Amino acid sequence: MVHQAQGQMVQEVAAGSLPAPPSRYVLREEHRPIGGSVAAELLDFPTVDLQRLAEPGDVEEAAKLRSALESWGLFAVTGHGMPESLLAGVRAAGLEFFHLPPEEKLRHANRTDDGEFQPDGYGIDRVDTDEQVLDWCDRLYLAVQPEERRRARFWPANPPSLAGLLHEYAQGSQRVARRVLAAMATALGLGEEFFLRRVGDRAAADARFTYYPPCPRPELVHGLKPHTDNSVVTVLLLDPDVGGLQVLRDDGRWVDVPVPGRGELLVVVGDEMEILSNALAGAGDDVPARYVARATNDAEAVAAAAPVPVIDVGLLCQLQPRGESATAEAARLRTALESWGLFLVANHGIEAPLMDAVMEASRGFFRQPLEEKQRYTNMADGEHFQLEGYGNDRVASEGQVLDWCDRLYLKVEPQDERNLPLWPTRLRGVLQEFTAECTKLKDRLLPEMAKLLELDDDYFGDQFGDKADTHARFSYYPPCPRPDLVFGLKPHSDGSFVTLLMVDSSVGGLQVLRDGVWYDVPTRPRTLLINLGDQMEIMSNGIFRSPVHRVVTNAEKERLSVALFYSVDPEREIQPAGKLVDENHQALYKKVKIKEYVAGLFEHFSQGKMVIDTARI
């Protein structure tokens, strides 16, 4: 069920004539907005005339747009084709809705039939925890484009003019967005269809009416907390009489956005434009600053290919009595686990046509238009990150350096916990079959690893439990104009027990760190890479390594990988195996709960840190 605070509308709180906002809305002092006697600087940004911008010879207007894109990422627009009367009507109808009696507005509450939160409808943004600081606003959120996405139950019947005005405004905003995207592409030296082709003709659009009641202590709260928009562009119709919108400068200062004219709109560049920018290979010599992870004179040593052994699974898993070939294969495996923490496997039992089908379906998914992939987005209701789905990894801070990759992340085991609406249709069949075959391979390898540590054959298998997690990650690395500046995937170790990885056979990029030197991991057709995770390093008391690895990009070729992360039941705790600890061999790691460890993994990954360091004694 939803959090109890979900049903408390800010408008009703404000009507109580309180001397100060309730504590649920009060920010910590260091997070409070500029207010009171301290005035924010006023933002100086351009107003772009879209009619003039469409004229090929108007260099001045194009220069204004490019300046706005490179500096602030937002600008006002005139000449957009929507009459001032329409804009005034939309503002007035929205205000009239929020002034309706509470019981009338709650007929369109943002709840499912089961009482759960969902994005469309009237209410406040999602409340997840008791500690969450709430924003001082109510909102009406509606899917508007394409029209078949509209859910009539959430579209208010009162005021009667709202639905018609919103329909007209949504169509006008869509035209504005497409004109802006064409102009942005032209201003950046690309063909005007560059962004439009990637967005597609049926791009999703949502409308958000946001109401900010008067607040007795505005210096204590946020109307809407700091964020970036999860969109390609946002077309914003502001109150022409009351300011409040601020943007963050590079130097950490907040700047007021001027109150626009009554016929002006504000256009804000969103996160999806950064995703689209991943396709800008050849558009210029540089990449956006958010992706720059390395200096141009990065002198990290990269040796030749790592001597990672290829283990023949058929030989390794011979039934008793084991021959010399099996013993030799086990010795090679032990050397790989103790030195590199990874190895390649051949004769693994997974048919080549299945492996090819998985790669072909995966590549086909990423090559689809953006609007098709966004059907499986990892942004719940367009605002809240969730682990599963299509998009980028979690962005935890303004200063976080982004990786040059898009990904599709899906929970595949336990089977009854699969979120099938997030499984692209083209992948469902092959992913299910591939997961089953990889799980068989994993189950064959675990006893062999246990034997190398003189543990019972079923020791690791028993640790997994009945509700062990398996996640699939499809990672797509577009060509990058400056691969020397970015990471496809920043250095990290896997938080899993073991990872099975299938990579492009013709494009390298995976590197592993050993003794301060990065080594290229070789690629071989139809082999799989087995990568040990942190859970194995902890349980083996450090005898087997969880390697630090990264992905670098290619200036000319795209790269694709498919990984299955096998993890212990999240409710279980792990620690070094008892047989590996004695008076001469102290435990090197603490007991950790898997659920807490994995949660820490994503936090540390976004910061470029290693979560396994928190488990060391």
Image: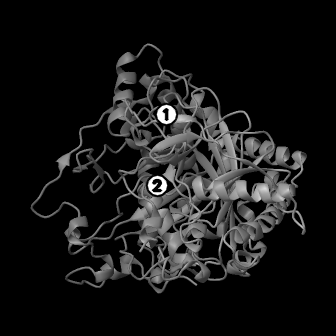
- Of the 4 image quadrants, the one containing the N terminus is bottom right
Name the one closer to the observer, 6 or 248: 248
- Comparing 344 with 561, the one in front is 344
Circles 2, 1 touching at the beta carbon (< 8 Å): no
> Up-down: is 504 above or below 440?
above
How packed mark 1 is, by other alpha carbons closer than 10 Å (few <14, some 14-19, many 20 or more), is many
Mark found first going from the N terminus, 2 or 1: 2
Residue 604 drawn above or below residue 291: below
Inspect the image, locate mark 2, and give the three-letter code of the amino acid beneath it.
Val
Which secondary structure, mark 1? helix
Residue identified by numbered label 1: 180
Q: In this view, does 75 lie above or below 213?
A: above
The residue at the point 85 percent across, 46 percent down is 357
Q: What residue type is labelled 1?
A: Val
The quadrant in which residue 139 appears is bottom left
- Residue 335 as seen in the image, left or right of residue 123: right
Q: Is mark 2 on a helix, strand or loop?
A: helix
Pick the residue in front: 549 or 456. Answer: 456
Mark 2 — residue? 90
In percent of width and height, residue 460 lies at: 70, 75
Tell me what residue is drawn at x 45 percent, y 60 percent.
610
Other residues around mark 2 within 10 Å, as few (<14) / some (14–19) / many (≥20): many
> Can residue 76 be seen from the camera position used here?
yes
Residue sitting at x 41%, y 42%: 290
Which of the 4 quarters of the picture holds residue 616?
bottom left
Residue extending furthest toward the top:
57
Residue 418 is situated, as x and y percent measured from the top left of the image, at 73, 69
Q: Quadrant of the C terminus?
A: bottom left
